[in-house]
């Protein structure tokens, strides 16, 4: 689907045994951090982003807190203060060190954090060894595997955040530091076409996916109105037209909140765009690069995405529309099998292969507020705070980015951010009602 | 449906000719303002609320701006600065005086605003006289009536805001001023039962309603999962239990954003609740009153509503669930006619008359983010800014309150406020998935 | 000295009996408020300014709190909530209603405040009648007169604030309301000369003044270095030159804090200056008026005063320098008698009469931080909070303005405001070390 | 005078040749940084404090900017971006990287900063070699030496800030990191006595000091009223009494601004005091230590110092009083020579040796706002921004702390900070008027 060169090949593992997958995930985090100095790893440039060192410790804390402490009676914690320092937001576990001050933790050092990782990894491997002999169908085994898989996916989510967060931190520095030498290779934009979808009753939410987060379910029926969706993402060139035709000065394109922010902050372009001596550049993981007009426009927020859509008389797709379209796309080597719940909603996949850039290039803003699916229940216990308590004022993104772990790409995955957040790898796909 | 004594009888007009309805609406605003001094009418206690005098001028401005100026070639505006002063948020009309500073306009005086009202009313009546002879089926006539009806409903919306805004302004004053002598008579709470609804494909949005705002359409099909909904609103007594059992100290009930606000502001009860010498009181239009444990809890925000629902293991209804339930209720003397789109969604109205307090008591928070219905298009021109540009980060409320104009009560009406807004007449109805 | 037309003649009383002086002062406040509607009297445009109605009530509260309640055993307070509502900042009296919310008190109405004034005035006159028969040399009589005089002066201070505060409130309104029809007549600027003063040991602080605030004493010796001082205030024309030559863009003129504020707020001119269609105007008590280039520049803050001084290679006078110069000026019909403490400091008054605009035109910023004189002790009791607790981060102004009560003009009077405050009648006089 | 163990012996050099002194100063900065990791050196916990790495680069930048670039025609700058990155506040040099974001500069790395230091040191030594042969009385030689001495003192000032800033950054970390193993040894408090001083005309400002900053002059005559001053600093035990007797709850002790801050932030003790399980601790360079009741109370702000003084019926000394007292103290092995300007001000030094803790223990807040001495002129050019533009809203501290370079201790030195700043090594000495 995507031939992007990711910073490291964070897309490799799919059918491995759990222990192997655990270790590979743990190793991947280390690889992502490897180009960075200990000073880089401490940077926190906005409260919503975290230092790389903190990511490395927090993901470790998650295994310690949700597996080792509750399940291993003899486990003794690595450090008495780490529960407080590396708890992100789980109130049921206890109080947390202030989110906005994570960049002020020069201690523990990165060496200590690495020791913490090794200590926890070693205990985890011991536990996994004990786990294997259990009957694979025993409740205990299933529950443990389920939890382990969740925490592996949790660390993989943080792997993407490590890249978005370090890019933002580097963007503040006038020296324009680079995370890696070469820029991400992104599909060149082909001509923008439209793919139509018939109305009908469809199934939304996780179906046959081997893993999913609680917020992807329950799967449920949804009546979809007829719509068409763009075959590719909006390019930098198209977005530049919007800017040059006065898009940031035309109130009618913008939501009321957005217009206020734009004017208060004198915004004239996306977060990472900089104009120098009449030429546009974009700050990337490879530092400041000339703007590639054919690449999809990236790191824009929901407000910008809706304004662009309004300016061309279109709109963003709902998350259900996006998901229906996505299930018509070949992913991981095979087509999604669309379940036809009603005749009118049946889809001929062979006709749909025009759709490009659905998965693994840029997260795509949808028009859908992040909310619970009908019948949604968070998981029991502290881990229930993972997703549910954020279901207000955020908007759903779909599709995954070049920085997402390959195994994460699936039609039901729901990412979510505030509508003014721009530092993720986010782009624009248009839609229209029929 | 509701035997509330409204401040003035703002529910009277339904089948009047337009001119009569126009004048009655104009008169109603004056009546609502009549208990207030010119000093009261100038108060603005929060940026989101406006002074009564401003409401009186702005609703006048709307008729002048959207009807008199564009449609009457000879009309000359009342005052050259009023376009700027009383434009609320229509960027297509021009710049606006700062929203948060409306309370600083001692000029124009209330006398001048009343002259403004009379000047515009007189011009409007002239125009309406000319309008009548037009063929009722002519495009011009239909468009004009449509616009007039919208602006009448606009002023009626402001009539409710006049009450919520003056109540909030008075609540700041330690003298506890009263707007009127007697408190609103609210249904005493009966026992809380549940009404179940079958799954099925239903119609959502305006149907046969004689008037609706653009955001109530287009009507569209929606697949509804099975659910049950509470037969009445949550009472003050039930909410007091929540408080006394530590609800404001238990993180797991609250959305993450809400928990932050509660702790930053040391919140322990709803906006208008005050504890004095061990007894709870509530600030109302009739001043500070002992808390009525049987009355529905009022003026709570979305965060409180969701926290309460979580604390009892329930949730808020979606706006679609609320609408389906509402169509099973007798309103304006007859049952809504529920269109059965699929057999499973057919409803036997006679079974549904248990539902109480659906209309005209308190607005009911739904779990639905305020967003466009499929195929929604704002109206053309400046008036298109009425609703569409606010479709982000707000939540839908349904049902109308005791302060809503009677003619506004309908199943498709979508009110919307930010999740931390509490100064409206808002309450809690619970729901649950089946 | 000054032939200004004050809004009302607030300068009349000097040698009256106390009762007469009390009543005249009370009457003056009513006269100052008389051009205003009850809506105008409620405006509060910045937290540091207060509504006129609040001034009228607070000055009344002061007589009630510091005289009637403690000294009249049978006095019963006018209203149980007024102690809380109209206490400005006296913690020893009790808690205070929030300063920034004074504009939200539509109740008490202006009629009730006027009743409050009459009630307190009546009780005060009774008390004064009892006071007169007391031996004039008795301790009780002296203390009572002393306190009364302080509170009369307190109300007179508020009379000036009533004018500055209503001007600021009116300046927010795009209708440019006027407080009175004709602009203040200010001395036309003559050519700017310099008056030199010899070094020497001098007396600073109140000397023979019939009244003074505690912060004007104790009188103390001060060694003054040789200096010269400008014979008049800086004119609008001179200040306009500063603006047009890039003064607001030249960092080297500005204190570091000031430079930050200027850039954060994009300031380019004084508070009340507005450029319209290429011409400069100034908002005044008489509304928006063309800028009078010969009038002294007014309503500028300490930051602007120091920047202007730096731009011409001068500085502001210290408060001691200003006071020494002021004692060489004819005031109230006679020259100040300068006490020669050391021969070198003796001054020949006849030579000094070049100095103009020292008193009663505009308050003049000095370079002196507002601090205690050596040996300063605040008054005993709650009234000790009058001045002392504000002795940090404010700067001393001298000379009085056209809005100051005539009897207040004296060489030792120390006014004080924060360096970013511009809404007072403040101007610039330059000085230089010799 | 003081037998404190400073972190490193930063007090050694007095009569060295300039080149030697330059190199010793440069070496001292490296030594102060030596216990810290590169992660520690990047911390910035408040906008007013800077990362250690930034201090190391900025002090280097000062030599490059004010000596190498203007005086060495062939000098080529180390890095084109460093002028922008390490300019603190010199607008005449150019724009500056945002002060509050210095902690976000992971690049340049500490290795690069060290290379920068070596590059500049090497160029400086070359320049100094050329400088030596110049006639010592030549203007060029004198001006160069003067500038060099200023910049050496500048770096020494930053050496103290390095300690205060890292202490503050460490204090945020719940792990309570230590900068060094052993706490500062501070004089145990003896009984508090009072030393009286006669009134008289005295000389204030630098006199025979071998070095002084521009703000210490011009020396000028000052008439001092009779006063007495405490013989030692206030101890932690005395300050604890103040706390335990309700000092932070008694409004009458506090300046109005201070009272507001205390209540807004719920302050109950000095910045670094923490109560754990009923016992008081203090965060220090040696981590969290039990509170030493006999040690002088440290890291308190001006507001706390004045409140404490008020609570015991005393006041802070003016900076002139402090200076007069300090000149009666033996420093650097000999008594200051007090110049008797008038007979009444003559002082018998032998009687004054009761005064303790005047120099090199804790900076002592004075009651004096930081302002220009009569006749003060900043230095010419960009370096003139060193001191003068900060002369507003700050208060003068005197005496130096245990972290001050030994050679800096002198009677005329004026340090200055905002009245709410507490993170410096600041204490309380009382005074009283006679």
Image (cartoon, coloured by chain):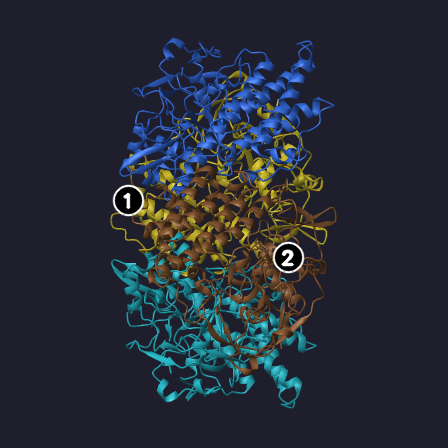
Chain colours: A cyan, B brown, C blue, D yellow
Question: Residue A205 in the image: x percent, y percent?
Answer: 51, 79
For label 1, the crowd category at 10 Å Cα-Cα, with few meaning under 14, some 14 to 19 and many 20 or more, is: few
Q: Callout 2: residue from which chain?
A: B
Comparing D117 with C188, the one in front is C188
The percent coordinates of residue C121 (x first, y second) are 62, 22
Residue position for label 1: D71
Residue depicted at x 40% and y 17%: C2
The residue most toward the front is B133
- Secondary structure beneath dot 1 equals helix
The reply, left or right, for residue D187 in relation to residue D162 is right
- Judged from the image, the secondary structure of the residue bearing numbered disc 2 is loop
Q: How many marks?
A: 2
Q: Quick check: D243 above or below C432?
A: below
Q: Looking at the picture, do discs 1 and 2 lie on one chain? A: no
For the C terminus of chain B, give its image quadrant: bottom right
Which residue occupies the foreground of this view, B261 or D123? B261
Q: Is residue A16 above or below residue B17?
A: below
Give how far across and how far down residue A358 sits, in percent.
39, 78
**Residue A332 found in image quarter:** bottom left
Q: Nearer the viewer, mark 1 or mark 2?
A: 2
Q: Is residue D90 visible?
A: yes
Which residue is denoted by mark 2 in the rendering?
B3
Callouts 1 and 2 close, C-beta under 8 Å:
no
Instruction: For label 2, count other residues whose C-alpha is less than 10 Å away and answer few (under 14), some (14-19) or many (20+).
Output: few
Give me the C-alpha separation between circle 1 and circle 2. 90 Å
Q: Chain of mark 1?
A: D
Depth check: give the residue in front, D215 or C22.
C22
Quarter of the N terminus of chain B within the rendering: bottom right
């Amino acid at each position: 689907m995507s031939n992007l060169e990711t910073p490291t090949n964070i897309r490799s593992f799919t059918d491995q045994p759990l222990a192997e997958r655990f270790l590979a995930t743990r190793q991947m985090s280390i690889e992502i951090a490897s180009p960075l100095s200990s000073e880089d790893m401490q940077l926190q440039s906005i409260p919503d982003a975290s230092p790389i060192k903190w990511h490395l410790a927090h993901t470790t804390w998650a295994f310690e807190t949700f597996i080792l402490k509750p399940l291993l009676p003899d486990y003794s914690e690595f450090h008495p203060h780490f529960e407080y320092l590396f708890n992100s937001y789980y109130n049921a576990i206890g109080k947390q060190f202030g989110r906005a001050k994570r960049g002020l933790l020069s201690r523990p050092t990165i060496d200590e954090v690495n020791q913490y990782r090794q200590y926890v990894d070693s205990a985890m491997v011991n536990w996994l060894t004990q786990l294997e002999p259990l009957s694979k169908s025993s409740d205990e085994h299933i529950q443990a595997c389920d939890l382990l898989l969740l925490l592996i996916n949790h660390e993989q989510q943080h792997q993407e955040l490590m890249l978005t967060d370090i890019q933002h931190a580097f963007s503040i520095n006038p020296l324009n530091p680079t995370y890696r030498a070469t820029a991400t290779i992104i599909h060149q934009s082909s001509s923008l076409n439209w793919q139509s979808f018939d109305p009908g009753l469809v199934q939304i939410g996780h179906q046959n996916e081997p893993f999913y987060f609680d917020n992807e379910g329950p799967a449920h029926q949804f009546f979809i109105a007829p719509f068409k969706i763009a075959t590719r993402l909006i390019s930098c060139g198209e977005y530049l037209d919007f800017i040059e035709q006065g898009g940031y000065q035309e109130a009618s394109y913008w939501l009321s909140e957005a217009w206020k922010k734009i004017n208060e902050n004198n915004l004239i372009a996306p977060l990472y765009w900089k104009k120098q001596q009449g030429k546009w550049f974009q700050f990337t993981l490879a530092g400041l690069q000339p703007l590639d007009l054919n690449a999809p426009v990236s790191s824009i927020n929901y407000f910008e995405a809706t304004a662009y859509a309004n300016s061309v008389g279109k709109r963003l797709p709902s998350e259900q529309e996006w998901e229906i379209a996505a299930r018509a796309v070949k992913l991981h080597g095979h087509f999604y099998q669309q379940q036809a719940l009603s005749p009118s909603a049946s889809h001929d996949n062979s006709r749909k292969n025009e759709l490009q850039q659905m998965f693994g290039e840029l997260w795509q803003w949808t028009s859908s507020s992040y909310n619970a699916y009908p019948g949604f229940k968070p998981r029991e216990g502290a881990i229930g705070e993972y997703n549910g308590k954020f279901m207000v004022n955020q908007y759903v993104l779909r599709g995954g980015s070049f920085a997402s772990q390959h195994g994460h790409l699936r039609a039901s995955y729901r990412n979510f951010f505030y509508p003014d957040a721009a530092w993720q790898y986010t782009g624009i796909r248009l839609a229209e009602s029929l």
